Image (spheres, grey):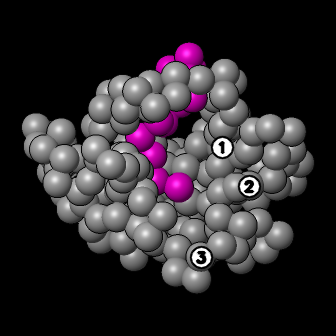
Amino acid sequence: MTGHSVLQLPVPPLEEWVRARTAHYDAGFVSTDPRFGHAHITALGPFDPDPSAEVLGRIAELVAATPPVRVRLADLAQFPNGIIHVVPDPDGPLRDLTARLVAAFPAWPPYGGEFDDVRPHLTVDAASEVVDLASTAVLLADVLPVEVVLDRLQLTWWESGACHVRQEWALGR
């Protein structure tokens, strides 16, 4: 299996920008599924590539108990691996959602257990010889800041040429 599942919260106000940036780097990851959140905050990934009805039901229960989350997206940061991202403020409700998903599905640690502190973020770019925080900030000057209510959780499949939403739930319902 070459792809992977991700539980993610789509961020519609940044969708057009992130979709275009995705196309710039690898058009294979531009989805034809209109629901697909290219712009998203990962709640848990990678996730079960073939979830059972029981797993999907447990996700639905968790999502129903999670109210929509209002965040402000304004500040850029960069991880040591070069990923440039927007930091959601506040991030507490997002950390809580991830913690509850991890508690429900301990076989799927965030990012495969690679990081000690899993920080909610929205990936927008990758540092290189020609891309850095400052250049990305210039590109996003007309887009940020934005306030958004995150109100959906998507189970997505990420694979070049096959990115799509497998299931979607409304938060708080």
Q: Residue at x 28, y 44 (%)?
A: 130
Per the model, the C-alpha gap separating discs 2 and 3 is 16 Å
**Front: mark 2 or 3:** 3
Name the residue carrying label 2. Answer: 47
Quick one: 45 or 93, which is closer to the camera? 45
Which numbered disc, 1 or 2, marks the residue that appears first in the sequence?
A: 2
Q: Residue 13: x, y in percent?
A: 28, 37
CA–CA distance in space, label 1 to label 3:
22 Å
Q: Which mark is residue 155?
A: 1
Kind of element beneath mark 2: strand
> Mark 1 or mark 3, which has the lower sequence index?
3
Q: Residue at x 44, y 25 (%)?
A: 23
Q: What distance separates the C-alpha of mark 1 from that of mark 2?
A: 9 Å
Which of marks 3 and 2 precedes in the sequence? 2
Q: Determine whether 170 is above or below 42 in the image.
A: above
Task: Tell me the residue at 66%/21% (across/down).
Answer: 161
User: Residue type at mark 2?
Assistant: Phe
Classed neighbour count for the residue bearing mark 3: other residues with Cα under 10 Å, few (<14), some (14–19), many (≥20): few
- Return the residue at label 3: 115
